[in-house]
Image: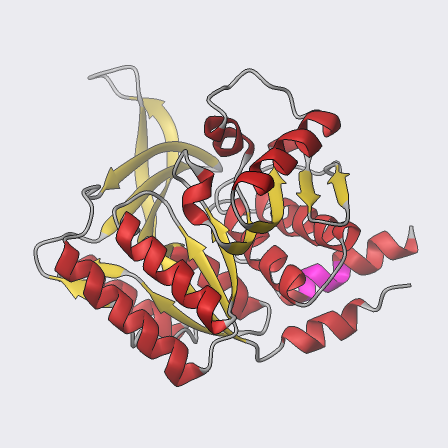
Amino acid sequence: MFEWNNFFNKIRGERVLVIGDIMLDRYLYGKVDRISPEAPVPVVALQKEEEKLGGAANVALNLKALGCEVDLIGSVGRDVSGEKLKQLLPEKGISADYLVEIKHRKTTVKSRVIGGSQHLLRVDSEELGALANEESQIVFNHYQRCVEEKEIGLVLLQDYDKGLFTNSLLKAILNFNQDSGIFTSVDPKKSDLCAYSPCQLLKPNWKEFQAHFGTTAWSPDRDLLIAKCSALRSSCPVDRMLITLSEHGVFYLDANEHVLTPTQSREIVDVCGAGDAVFAIASLAAKFGLNADQIGKLSNIAGGLVCQHLGVVAVELSEMRQELAEQSSN
């Protein structure tokens, strides 16, 4: 029987770098007991406000919760929200030393209105234009300095299509990592998944995977997944693929094996942040050589645990251990 504790002990203290679109998640919690007389919408009596790490920062938070030492690179605006992110990161034990502050660009903020236990509304404040060439160069300079100073062995690229990953920056990072022998995992957003190669792990969701092939009509059938993943890997250098399939589970494939791991029945409260948790644990599992069944199991557990909580949360190591122990005893 596989010793999960050995794996968790190995990843403790692992130096990991996350680069991607950083966001501030703002939550407005309140009570709903009437409908507005001005429009057929609920009136939320505000009770509490909360700000959390979002986007690539939430991926970093998940890695930290699993015991890793984490650095984060991305751009923030020279604004109140950017300052809040720079405050929250060190409070959570994540280095903010390599963030790039851009004066004319506002920080991405997602504000969610929660009435009771129901997610009622989300308001996004963001700029989606690509970074200028000189800004991309600054980001890459920070990236290169961080990798060399911290002796990084695992890099996670988290793309939310908010403008950070220009084609030139993406290629510069991927080529640098290949030349340096750095294990690279990618959570993509571009429709051309080959834009993220070469990499060691590519983790699209089902919608993103279909978009690469120009369709939205497929069902996640095992034979189709095998054929299409193999076709993609033959056209661009990607060592491993993990496709998240929502309620259908996850599919993992590499050169030697594949597995479709179905979800386990559990109460779903909120799916926000599930993909970040899956990306974090799957990247570590792949880097440390776990097999397809083990990667699929860890991914499903991580995503499922997040879905049991309201709002974006990081999966705690204690939760992972408990769930694995319960599954092993059944």
Q: Is residue 24 toward the left or the right of residue 216 in the image?
A: left
Residue toward you, 59 or 153: 153
Between residue 226 and residue 300, name the one nearer to us: 226
Please identify the residue farthest to the bottom as the structure is shown: 149
Number of marks: 0
Residue in view at x 38 percent, y 48 percent = 159
291 vs 283, left or right, is right
Q: In the image as oriented, which residue stretches furthest toward the front?
A: 235
Overall secondary structure of the magenta stretch? helix
Asked if residue 212 lies in the magenta stretch, the reply is no
Q: Position of residue 242 (x, y in %)?
A: 62, 45
- Residue 85's quadrant in the figure? bottom left
Image quadrant where one finds the N terminus: bottom right
At 74% from the left edge and 29% from the top edge, which residue is drawn? 222
Compared with 196, 80 (above or below) is below
Q: Residue furthest left?
A: 104
Q: Position of residue 320 (x, y in %)?
A: 69, 60
Q: Is residue 79 visible?
A: no
Question: How far across and how far down the image is residue 34, in percent?
Answer: 35, 24
Residue 241 position in % (x across, y down): 61, 46
Q: Which residues are magenta?
A: 318-322
Which one is nearer the viewer's eye here, 7 or 131? 131
Q: Looking at the picture, does residue 327 appear above or below residue 232?
A: below
- Residue displayed at 47% across by 50% down: 197
Does 39 appear above or below 265?
above
Q: What colouring style does the render use?
A: secondary structure
- Answer whether residue 88 is visible to the viewer in this image: yes
Q: Give the residue at x 91% y 56%.
A: 329
Indicate whether 159 appears above or below 211. Answer: below
**Drawn side of residue 92 relative to residue 138, left or right:** right
